[in-house]
Image (tube, rainbow, N blue to C red):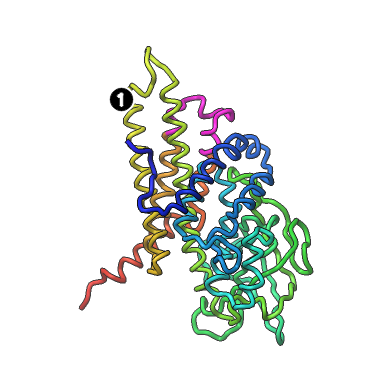
Amino acid sequence: MARLAQTAGLTDIQREILATVKDFVDKEIIPHAQALEHADEYPADIVAGMRDMGLFGLTIPEEYGGLGESLLTYALVVEQIARGWMSVSGVINTHFIVAHMIRQHGTDAQKQHYLPKMATGEIRGSFSMSEPDLGSDVAAIKTRARQDGDDFTIDGAKMWLTNGGSSNLIALLARTDDGAPKPYQNLTAFLIDKPEGFGEVAPGLTIPGKIEKMGYKGVDTTEAVFTGHVVGRGKVLGGATGRGFAQMMDGVEVGRVNVAARACGIAIRAFELAADYAQQRRTFGKPIVEHQAIAFKLAEMATKVEAAHLMMVNAARLKDSGERNDVAAGMAKLLASEYCAEVTQEAFRIHGGYGYSKEYEIERLMREAPFLLIGEGTSEIQKTIISRGLLRDYRTRG
């Protein structure tokens, strides 16, 4: 039988990229992930290796110095990286979302300025939509950008910025006074340049420090506090106010494919660890894999890994085709994240008491998998998106 999570119809270039990334994951990420994760240490050498491979510019068009690859290629790369260590995939996820938003919605000047430097990793992006008391109600954003001539003064607090300290560009969603009848039509996306680091990194912009987390360590997750931070009109994404909600949702849509890919990567690794351990561990005179209870667990785990991978690939290909993929991305994110948690827990159970030890890799995966249940929208939010999308085509007429 072929190994799990194989993708049909790839080009020679895609296969070459994935083979290179898999080799990098096996040699440079997996052997070091445990120590770096337990120390909550930023994986600087791994990030440098990804820059050398051109992964920061994977989907950026060739005219701007990138590789010009598809969302599918990117998702499969992320799947492999997350198989090694989910936090490393987080380093490039928000960067990718911001690059996608600039490529799709930026002005020519914004594309010329940002994309070449993003392709090399000189500029690395973070994504700022959520707020301390906001949750999933994006239209209720309180952070305000008040216009005075050609400048905007921004005040408010943002939450859960992945790469908030290590990035030097923030895609920010803030409320502007556009007089539109619906709240989401008064939201604008800004491109905020800043130095890397913590504290008051720019006048009126403070990155307080890293938020301590159960898992998803190594990568920094932060708040961002804006107090009279001033930017010029040229930092409005696309040049026009009031379009930020649609621009951010486009970014979140590809971000959901990314989260699905990360969930697939963790699930693949959990299955690999469980299959390996079950063949080595012996009870009652034989390897535990020969006990039907364990064999059945592996069968169910493998089926879930395969189903999640196929849905993730379908969502990526749909987006690449130019079709609307909100339902497909929501389904892929929902299924992959839920299955990831289930597969990881079964792998943990197969390890028995050793799974609770920090010596074993499955302990780390058990702390990483829950993040994917809430990242880029909870499972409940995905169900809302899916049901609304389905009713576009299945609503009863009459």
Looking at the image, which residue is at 49% across and 48% down?
18
Which residue of the protein is positioned furthest toward the left in this rendering? 398
Q: State the quadrant of the C terminus.
A: bottom left
Residue 240 found in image quarter: bottom right
Instruction: Give the quadrant of residue 172.
Output: bottom right
- Name the residue type under label 1: Gln
- SS at badge 1: helix
Judge by depth and name the residue closer to the eye, 301 or 45: 45
What residue sits 67% from the left and 62% below the top? 123
Residue under label 1: 292
User: Quarter of the image containing the N terminus?
Assistant: top left
Residue extent of the magenta highlight: 347-366
| Residue 52 horizontal/vertical position (percent) | 64, 51
Is residue 260 among the parts visible in the rendering?
no
Q: Is residue 392 left or right of residue 86?
A: left
Residue 122 image point, x, y percent: 69, 60
State which quadrant residue 102 falls in.
Answer: bottom right
Residue 196 colored in magenta in the image: no
Residue 376 locus on image (x, y percent): 50, 58
Residue 22 can be seen in this image: yes
Q: Residue at x 52, y 79 (%)?
A: 185
